[in-house]
Amino acid sequence: LIQHELTEMDSSASLVFEDGALRFSQANVDLAASGIIFTDLQTALQQHPDLVRQYFMTTAVKPDHNKFTALHAALWDSGTFVYVPANARAILPLQVILNQASAGVGNYHHTLLVTETGSEITLVDDLLGAKDGLQVSVVELVVGNSSVVRYMNLQDFDHSAWNFLTGRAVLDRDADLRWIQVSWGSRLTKAFLDLDMVDQGTHAELLGIYFPTGSQHIDHQTLQIHRKPHCFSDLLFNGALKDKARSVYMGIIQVHKDAQKTDAYQRNGNLILDPHARADSIPGLEIEADDVRCTHGATAAQVEEEYVFYLMARGLSRPQAERMIVQGFFQAVLDRVPVESVVHKLERVIERKIGG
């Protein structure tokens, strides 16, 4: 499985963690030549101690952020460190595979990505395994002036895992971020995801896909913080639910009094595929400025029989028709995933989840 994940994606470099230890690493020569640092966190502490101490749980996520970050700060055991100097660029994505192979254990993985002025990077985290286990992870993205970051967190843990994620991105002037958050697995997921726009001119997108089945419970809590004027943020989370699954979404757009000319969106859509599934959605606005454009909305609906009939009248079976409708529902997010191999992988998982 790990070898398949490695060969499926064209990448500039790869790291593979298993049960909290680094098992494999490889990188193209061009990556080191550009000054980009991509290594495990323990090695980074040895080779770049000052750089790590400057950013590790000091800028984006601090130990007292919540009870899970306090636990993580005390027990973290594996991690990824990415540093991109000014004007450096990696054309292909960086790939991290975290496989919690042993059952019934805890893992505390940390992702720290820092970019300097005018740089560009794409990072993909693949999270697997964790049968009957616990994962308490932290993601810190420190996005420098005029830099471009594409980050994908692809969670596909075993359906018996307990997963707690705290992720926060801090964006400087004219920074550009697209964050893809995917929640397929786990028995329970609680994810805190924040966008903190600390200077003007930033552009941030937070996109999510989730598809709980069986008795899975997926809970996302998001925060879009606009501190300065002329910033844009766009949030789109789409989820489908089967069997007795449950999802919860709670999000807030927070606009400070100095953040005039803010342009912010927040939308959560839910497709209910079984009568026993349940989706709760609580979008919200906290606006202190008076010259802004902010919208939010949430929907929950079942598959329309009219749509199913239309497709079946053209020769498709009911499972095929329902599969096509669900795939179309997710397409709004898939169209914005910047790595083609990741799109294909997500499409396969959607087919697996739909079944039939």
Image: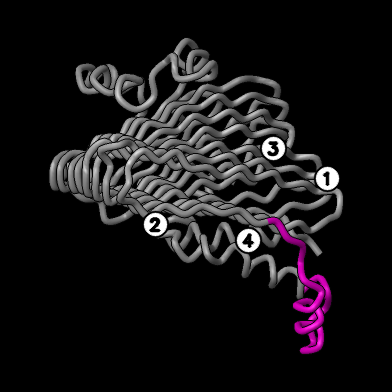
Q: Disc 2 marks which residue? A: 10
Q: Secondary structure at mark 2?
A: loop
Q: Toward the viewer: 224 or 43?
A: 224
> Would you identify the image quadrant in which residue 325 lies?
bottom right
Chain part drawn in magenta: 300-320
- Answer with mark 4 or mark 3, whichever residue precedes in sequence: 3
How far is the residue under mark 1 from the one under mark 2? Answer: 37 Å
Q: Secondary structure at mark 4?
A: helix
Decide: few, some or many residues near mark 4? Use Cα within 10 Å; few <14, some 14-19, many ≥20. Answer: few
- Answer with mark 4 or mark 2, whichever residue precedes in sequence: 2
Q: Is residue 308 magenta?
A: yes
| Kind of residue sitting beneath label 3 | Asp
Q: Toward the viewer: 194 or 118?
A: 194
Q: Disc 4 marks which residue? A: 348
Q: Disc 1 marks which residue? A: 244
Decide: few, some or many residues near mark 2? Use Cα within 10 Å; few <14, some 14-19, many ≥20. Answer: some
CB atoms at circles 2 and 3 under 8 Å apart? no
**Where is residue 249 drawn, in percent x and y?**
61, 42
Nearer the camera: disc 1 or disc 2? 1
Residue under the image location 37 percent in, 55 percent down? 293
Image quadrant containing the C terminus: bottom right
How far is the residue under mark 4 from the one under mark 1? Answer: 22 Å
**Residue 102 position (above or below residue 342):** above
Q: Disc 3 marks which residue? A: 158
Q: Is residue 107 magenta?
A: no
- Answer with mark 2 or mark 3, whichever residue precedes in sequence: 2
